Amino acid sequence: MRCVVTGGCGFIGSHIVDALIRDGSDVVVLDDLSTGNHEHLNPEAELIEGTVADPETVRSTLRGATWVFHLAALARVQQSVDDPIGSHSVNVNGTLNILQGAREQNVERLIVSSSSSVYGEQTTHLMTEELPPRPMSPYGLHKLIGEQYADLFARLFGLQVVSLRYFNVYGPRQSSKGAYALVIPHFLRLRDEGKPLTIFGDGHQTRDYVHVEDVVRANMQAASAELPAGHAITLNVGSGEETSVNKIARMVGGKVEHINPNPRGAFEELRKCADTSRAKSLISWTPNISLSEGIRSIL
């Protein structure tokens, strides 16, 4: 079976590539290496260096594919605020190119990596797929538009699409460098450098942290599960547990420094936790790796 992974040199994508190769698939990776790392690429995978923003590159890459896993994105909230047009080009136009290419090439199933950023600030901390999206950043809006395009292509053209809303994914190969590093690898790097763990605001804001291996299983099960046709399926992928930034700092260990006022301001979502019951019902997926176990594995 031929599978394509866009962004397959990235953090999550490279782990999906490994899983597909272990299962005996022929894997093609499309990555422009702008944020991906060639060292993460499985040597048994074929690399096409290019961008999802180019329709012809996408069309030729998807030729003959059975499953396509679309992870290529400029996947940072602040980056989308700093450069909304550039982010839109990759996150929205790139996803539309993948959908059109999958339709033209008769791909059996497309798995789109979405984000819990589509929820934005809600009146509840427990995120269910039925909640009305309220994105608070261009990135969240880009992911929502991608989901809407996916549903439209499913209804108009019969394309089989599953959109997975990732919560805060962590694990091996996650970048700890740059202005957009996420909290767990950022804390680990600061600790290793002997610097205080910097927390924006009071640190009571919560997130749902899910290990990358659980995310990989969600992708694999979404690709192979028997699902109803006629519309795209949207599923939360998280741990189902709410954890504060302060608690993450205690688990990593080290001196803490709070930065007030919070420089993220209006873009900081205060509480978030995934309801994963739909994923359990439709693709028989539940998270297996606890946060304490996951953090111990990367300390």
Image (cartoon, rainbow, N blue to C red):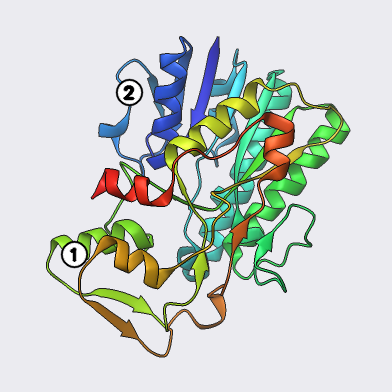
Q: Is residue 145 left or right of residue 285?
A: right
Q: Residue at x 79, y 62 (%)?
A: 132
Q: Position of residue 185 (x, y in %)?
A: 30, 56
Q: Position of residue 283 (x, y in %)?
A: 68, 30
Q: Quadrant of the N terminus?
A: top right
In the depicted structure, whether residue 81 falls above or below residue 228: below
Mark linked to residue 191: 1
Amino acid type of disc 1?
Arg
Mark linked to residue 42: 2
Q: Quadrant of residue 160?
A: top right
Q: Position of residue 235 (x, y in %)?
A: 68, 43
Q: Going by the picture, which residue comes out furthest to the bottom?
A: 261
Amino acid type of disc 2?
Asn
Q: Earlier in the sequence, mark 2 or mark 1?
A: 2
Of 4 and 242, nearer the camera is 242
Which element type, helix, strand or loop, lies under badge 2? loop
Q: Quadrant of residue 199?
A: bottom left
In the depicted structure, whether residue 68 falls above or below residue 65: below
